[in-house]
Amino acid sequence: MPQPGALRAVLAFPSTYTVGITSLGYQVVWATLAQRPDVDVRRLFTDQGDPAHGGRRGGGPALDLFGLSLSWELDGPVLLDLLEQQRIPLWATERGDDDPIVFGGGPVLTANPEPLAPFFDAVLLGDGELLLPAFIDALQECRDAPRSERLRRLAQVEGVYVPSLYAPRYGAAGELLAVEPIEAGLPATISKQTWRGNTLSHSTVITPEAAWPSIHMVEVVRSCPELCRFCLASYLTLPFRTPSLEDGLIPAVEKGLSATQRLGLLGASVTQHPEFSELLRWLNGERFADTRISVSSVRASTVTQELATILANRGSKSLTIAIESGSERMRELVNKKLQTDEIYAAARHAKAGGLSGLKLYGMVGLPGENEEDVEATAALLLALKAATPGLRLSLGVSTFVPKAHTPFQWQGVRPEAEKRLKLLAKRLKPKGIELRPESYGWSVIQALLARSDRRLAPVIALARGRHESLGGWKQAYKAVLNGEGAGGPDRTLPPPPPWPEVVHSPWGEERPLPWQHLKGPLDTSTLWRHAGLAAAQD
């Protein structure tokens, strides 16, 4: 129970309860706050929320903290609706001493918070295991101080970025030159925080109302050792971390299975945990006979018949593997380290082990890709179907979107990707292979949000109410480009660059990046070298 005088907090998720409560990151942040007696935290989703806090105490604010967990660029604009619902000023510069500190975290904000920066008072960069407690401790130390003093104290916490204390500097032509601290004593760069403990996260809420009903999720690995050159989940979260079996994974699994018989094993590449085989064999024991087990995407080269058999025995119907492309040339270019015969072997093992389906994930529009590479993807799926009759195949395919802190961050979205999605549909659907394409148009908007600087904030504000329409985004961008619309309190910002420059154009090494003042695991020169390795293979 919260103690008297506890900080009053709301932790929001920019989607419905069913979706939000399935987010392991959101669950863990909420549990971390809820377990502190000095914090009284309530949850908020777009369709419901916990009972609101009581009225103002002693003339003070009814709310001290408002937090948002963000894992998907396209959810960012929902923040403004949630702030308005709580009667919090949308722009950070318009908040006073009686308004809550608005903070956020998650992979999207860690990668590039700049488009949403004017709406946040603080952004927590990286893993929250130590960062979140340090953030709350610092706030408790100065909770009665004026807002400006609280923000300056928070900016001293390693991994906490306070956007109002950093200003973008633009050139005569309106080009971004740098994002710099506005006064002495502030760090010039802010580093993301990395948790290196022996345990990772697991569910703190198990409910039948979740998108994955009554599931206990256990994080088996964090990051990925493969370093595919487009992959945010790998590059941003380095180093690759694996909890021990006896002290980390087994206790986490046991805790959840006392409440449910459904287990989800999560991670970018769970089968690369060095003790994953031992974990599976333990779960194959008789005591787990009624437990249903599912795993997230696995590396194709690690699929064995034993893996498929155990998963089939525990209720799984299919496996998911990422192939990126049917072209070996493209897989080498993106550093996939996957041979075609390993994909065939994964399909054979899945079928022989008793699974009924194999889900494959790929991309179109990757740097260096040509139409023959896309034809190779279609040919591979058709050949897989012929080689493993009876195994249900599906291909999820997305358009390449450049992500900050990866070697392909300098690339743009390729317009020909839209035609190549249609090409795959033409080749595969008549042959009975399920194709699940992501919208090219929404990939473009995702790139706009992933690649922009603070000049996008007025666009986000103007797009409110029509952000679920591609036309709404383009109209808002055009209006701000022409000096119209919701510019926000800071009228000194130049207009944003032309749309194609942000979304489609490749950028040179010399161009300052909107997120360059935020340090990821690898520095810019290393990422550029990795990008050069891809270019050399093209």
Image (tube, helix red, strand yellow):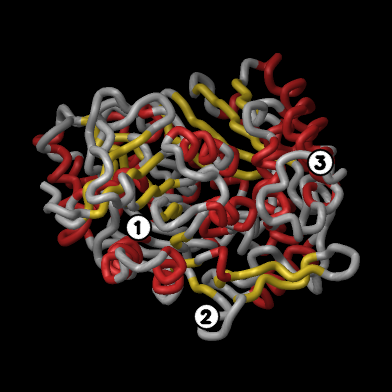
Q: Nearer the viewer, residue 442 or 434?
A: 442
Marks 3 and 2: which is nearer the front?
A: 3
SS of the residue at dot 2? loop
Residue closest to the far bottom: 184
- Residue 273, labelled with which disc? 1
The C terminus sits in image quarter: bottom right
Of residues 200 and 488, the one nearer the viewer is 488
Q: State left or right for residue 206 relative to residue 299.
A: left
| First in residue order: circle 1 vs circle 2 | 2
Of discs 1 and 3, which sits in the foreground? 3
State whether residue 294 is above or below residue 412: above
- Tally the numbered discs: 3
Name the residue type under label 3: Glu
User: Circle 2 sits on which residue?
Assistant: 186
Position of residue 238 relative to residue 490, above or below, is below
For disc 1, the neighbor class at 10 Å (few under 14, some 14 to 19, many from 20) is many
Q: Which residue is mark 3?
A: 484
Q: Position of residue 57 (x, y in %)?
A: 23, 47
Decide if residue 481 is on the left or right side of residue 71: right
